[in-house]
Amino acid sequence: MAHGPATLADGWGKYISRWVFTTNHKDIGTLYLWFSFAMFIMGGAFAMIIRAELFQPGMQLIKPEFFNQMTTMHGLVMVFGAIMPAFVGLANWLIPMMIGAPDMALPRMNNLSFWILPFAFAILTSTLFMEGGGPNFGWTFYAPLSTTYAPDTVNYFIFGVHIMGASSIMGSINIIATVMNMRAPGMTYMKMPLFVWTWVITAFLLVAVMPVLAGAVTMMLMDINFGTSFFDAAGGGDPVLFQHIFWFFGHPEVYIIILPAFGVVSQIIPTFSRKPLFGYSSMVYATAAIAFLSFVVWAHHMFTVGMPIAGELYFMYATMLIAVPTGVKVFNWITTMYRGSLTFETPMLFSIAFVILFTFGGFTGMMLSIAAADMQYHDTYFVVAHFHYVMVAGAVFSGTAAVYYWLPKWCGRMYDETMGKVQFWIAFIGFNITFMPQHFLGLAGMPRRYADYGLQFADWNMVSSIGAFMYGGAQILFLFNVIRTIGWGKPTDDPKVWEGAEGLEWTLPTPAPYHTFATPPKIK
Amino acid sequence: MSTEGTYYVPDQSKLPIFAATGMGVMAYGAASWVLEGGTATIFLIGALIMAAVLYKWWSIVIDENMRGLASPQLKHSYVLGMLWFIFSEVMFFACFFGALFYVRVLVNSWIGGEAAVGWFDDTPTDAAAANAVHLWPGYEATWPPMITPDQAVNGDAAQFKGPDQAMNNPGILNWGSWLPFWNTAVLLTSSFTVHIAHVALKDGNRKKFNRWLGVTVALGIFFLFLQAEEYIHAYQELGLTLESGIYGTTFFMLTGFHGMHVTLGTVMLLIQWLRGLKGHFTEDDQFGFEAASWYWHFVDVVWVGLFIFVYILT
């Protein structure tokens, strides 16, 4: 191409049209990442409102109706607006550079996948300002809460989810086509970096389950507006049918969130251990095994709805099986570090914290998988603590690690190591103060999704809220670090950035040029 | 794996942002349309934007192909894109078929107070027994359910009322006068005719291609006509509607979504037919047509599933 990307020096018009009309995978990756951060701040603000209300027992700041909207919107925004787009952004930036491709396979569709999201989330958040308020039925939107008893604005939620799903499906098809079709000569499947592997499997999961989510919200739409009875036993349907369909989507969805995080950590740990990843092929097979199992365990979210005993047993044992490939991964990360020349830069700190805290979240998952024990844990704060250990300390920590790790390659400037470490420790300590006590609250019987609680839960809730504000503050520091790096960080032009880094993206100049690998490299 | 360094990466494009705008307006418009007193205006504006963008988008892609910008590698990306799109459609239908099976095999008998037929054990669970005694006394599990649980308890005051008659399989000997059978015949035939057209195109026999693709489009339209007849029959003579409990729900949602996909497939094939008349496609480059024909075969396979599980096995 004759010209480089437009900068602010070319005037605002050109600069804005660059981002709106772009077909460049790096621009689109950047858009995804900034969008996801904006959503992360918004979802985080909702969480702060929740924790502020729960700081003390009794109703303090907001009405219970609004509290319900906050828990719902927090979940929806974080899952669909923050975490998923963050990893799609990383995929856009990194996959072409990692496999030696000039761009994504379908660049225009790539742009479309991104620009649907601002519309979808504008529709979703606008419901908060409408009569009746936003969605208030939990991010899992169980029928009949989301059908018979939902506010009218549920229709906006339904169509918002529809176009969000279209965005995800197009994005995933693009990733699959890129990986299957765009690898440089000699880049066989078993030479691909693990991040690419985890993403292509994630993309497969997305193409498989986003249509099921579309089906679920379509059934809701019909039940609400057109007199069908999918989820109404009076007509011969069943509200539990909703849960089956939702979790057939929902369980693969949680792996959609965590698998790319596995990929990120599998890139970072070898670099700072100065050793190749231990057990590469077992990592690939473990990822595939986790993806397969994710389709056959969904009803472990529903142990208390009254399934036949055979169903309870099957879903219990199948769920426990997931610990096997996950264990393979955890042991491989640890073995990669074993006898390595470890250094502890910020990405490595986040990655090690990931391994420890994700494993902790995995263990509480094992506890929850025991059907008999789950009768006690179900819908308590124990579940909340469990999935925040895997969502926050898992997905968000690894996303943060990825930003620190690749940011110098993207913008040619180093972040400030001290600032990075300060953020890490505040986030790490704040996170644990927030969510560790929620295990105790849950085991003591505090139910989730309530705006108020009994006095016996007061102390740990106050501790949890203090931790949450601390963790929230760490994100402001993160934003500051990133902006400071991009604007005023120490310039670097070392292609490798990190001495132990391996992979095609580190053979490119730093900062990465606008177009890379126009001619594919040869991989030996 | 790529072999040459000439993958076409398009320059900046205005298409996607207009498409995203169209989708956003459509989504917002659809949501306000279904509300009490809502109108379709905003939705239609969105749909119009979307239609214009898609027309422009495909014109550009076709133009790029004709200018030789599409390398074999890029064409393979399009192939992969279409195949995985069809896979996502398969999963969409799997969702509705799954709902049908779950309701038919498990829920229906549970509401009727029986154990699920032959699954694991035959003793009714406490929950199923409680259903029969406390929630829906008098409901008997049959498929299709002609009386909804609501009706069994509340009689004429029920909100959900079953159909007067079901879309029953009259037995194989009487299939000659049974509309779904003819629908099946029409759609299966169209899968063959589109294949004949494909083979003709590969042989360079343009006349034969145009003729058989035209026949396929006509069969698609005929199928839609028959389907419309069947819906009128169901609504007016059988009293079977979308609101006839779970049977009407699953019947109309499955066949309705299939019908929408047939409509889409017919439009796709019609456009390929018009392109063929304009002289598009060559003996070895015909992806637009091929993609539409794969979609058509997919729609056909879904119908076979519908014919078996919605129509025959009642």
Image (cartoon, coloured by chain):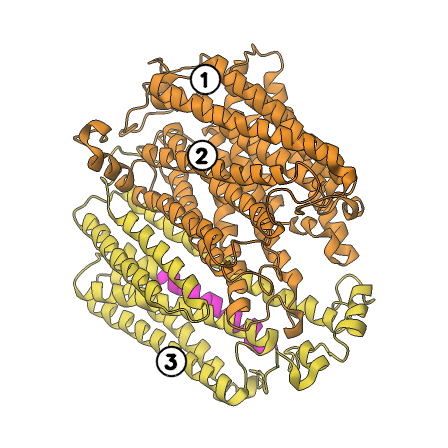
Chain colours: A orange, B yellow
Q: Are marks 1 and 3 in contact (CB under 8 Å)?
A: no
User: Main SS of the magenta segment?
Assistant: helix
Q: Please give the chain letter of the residue carrying mark 1.
A: A
Q: Position of residue A192 (x, y in %)?
A: 45, 30
**Image quarter for residue A506?**
top left
Q: Residue furthest front?
A: A60
Q: Which mark is residue A501?
A: 1
Residue at the image point whose x is 57% and y is 40% from the top:
A49
Q: Which mark is residue B225?
A: 3
Residue that badge 2 annotates: A37
Q: Is residue A29 above or below residue A508?
A: below
Nearest to N terminus: mark 1 or mark 2: 2
Q: Amino acid at mark 2?
A: Phe
Q: Residues within 10 Å of mark 3 (few under 14, many from 20)?
A: few
On-image quarter of the C terminus of chain B? bottom right
Q: Secondary structure at mark 2?
A: helix
Q: Residues within 10 Å of mark 1 (few under 14, many from 20)?
A: many
Q: Position of residue A275 (x, y in %)?
A: 53, 15
Residue at the image point whose x is 35% and y is 55% from the top:
B23
Q: Which residues are magenta?
A: B293-314
User: Whole-Å distance between the Cαs marked 1 and 3?
Assistant: 63 Å
Q: Is residue A372 above or below residue A424?
A: below
Q: Amino acid at mark 1?
A: Ala
